[in-house]
Amino acid sequence: MRADGRYLTDVWTGEAVQFIERHAAGPFFLHVAYNAPHAPLQAPEEEIAPFAETGNFNWGVCCVYGMIRRMDEGVARILQALREKAIEENTIVLFTSDNGPQFGGGGRECTTRFNCGLNGAKGSVYEGGIRVPMVLRWPAGLPAGRLFGGMVHFCDWFPTLLAAAGARPPRDMTLDGIDVLPLLRGDDGQVETRRFWQWNHYTPLATCNAAMREGNWKLVRP
């Protein structure tokens, strides 16, 4: 598919809204994988301007924030589509990121910025690279405004969403994740605190950039 001049974030949003309109009458799964914020640093000028006008950030950071601003507008459109189809109450919406922010770059395109005081960024297994927030919205199934501080891994979402949908994985399938839905609802219980991470920068070296955590302790290698 050749570019037609539209901003790609808007393309993903438009396709998502159309998907909801086509499938609102029955159960559906929609995965909207925005590529923003990400290199190349490109955003509409009207999205960059509010951050540039503050004088607090260099151009690269302003552009990243502009990309996020446009993505936020897209998420609002998707939620509005659910509302217009009267299915928002019983639709589960998960919003998260696959990693921490990308730092680096030179001159005006440097993207190093605030990361909640966490060490590291995208590409590392320090907390700044792998610890990300997640917002979950399901009015008919979860209490509103609840903050859950337990450690949930990405692999937990598959069994959790299956449970929320009233489904089960195949009996012969071994899952790495656990169903955390009861905990999200406020029931007693504990999350799994022994977890492993490894990202080798595309080089087959298993001991590179690896981490293990158990409870409050974390081991990082190298």
Image (tube, rainbow, N blue to C red):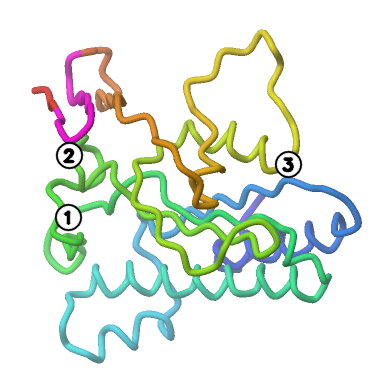
Q: CA distance from mark 2 to mark 1?
A: 20 Å
Task: Give percent across and percent down for residue 113.
Answer: 17, 64
Q: Residue at x 73, y 66 (%)?
A: 89
Is 208 within the magenta? yes
Counting other residues with Cα less than 10 Å from the Cα at mark 3, is it few (<14), some (14-19), or many (20 or more)?
Answer: few
Give the extent of the magenta segment. 207-218
Check residue 126 in the rendering and tell me which mark sits there, or answer none: 2
Q: Amino acid at mark 1?
A: Gly
Q: Residue at x 25, y 91 (%)?
A: 53
Q: Residue at x 29, y 26 (%)?
A: 197
Comes first in the chain, label 2 or label 1: 1
Looking at the rendered image, the disc whose residue lies closer to the viewer, 3 or 1, is: 3
Secondary structure of the residue carrying numbered label 2:
loop
Is 144 within the magenta? no
The answer to the question of whether label 3 and label 2 lie on touching residues, with beta carbons closer than 8 A, is no
Q: Quadrant of residue 60?
A: bottom left
**Quarter of the figure with the C terminus:** top left
- 127 and 202: which one is in front? 127
Q: Quadrant of residue 217?
A: top left
Q: Amino acid at mark 3?
A: Ala
For disc 1, the marked residue is 105
Total count of labels: 3
Q: Is residue 48 above or below residue 23?
A: below
The furthest residue to the right: 25
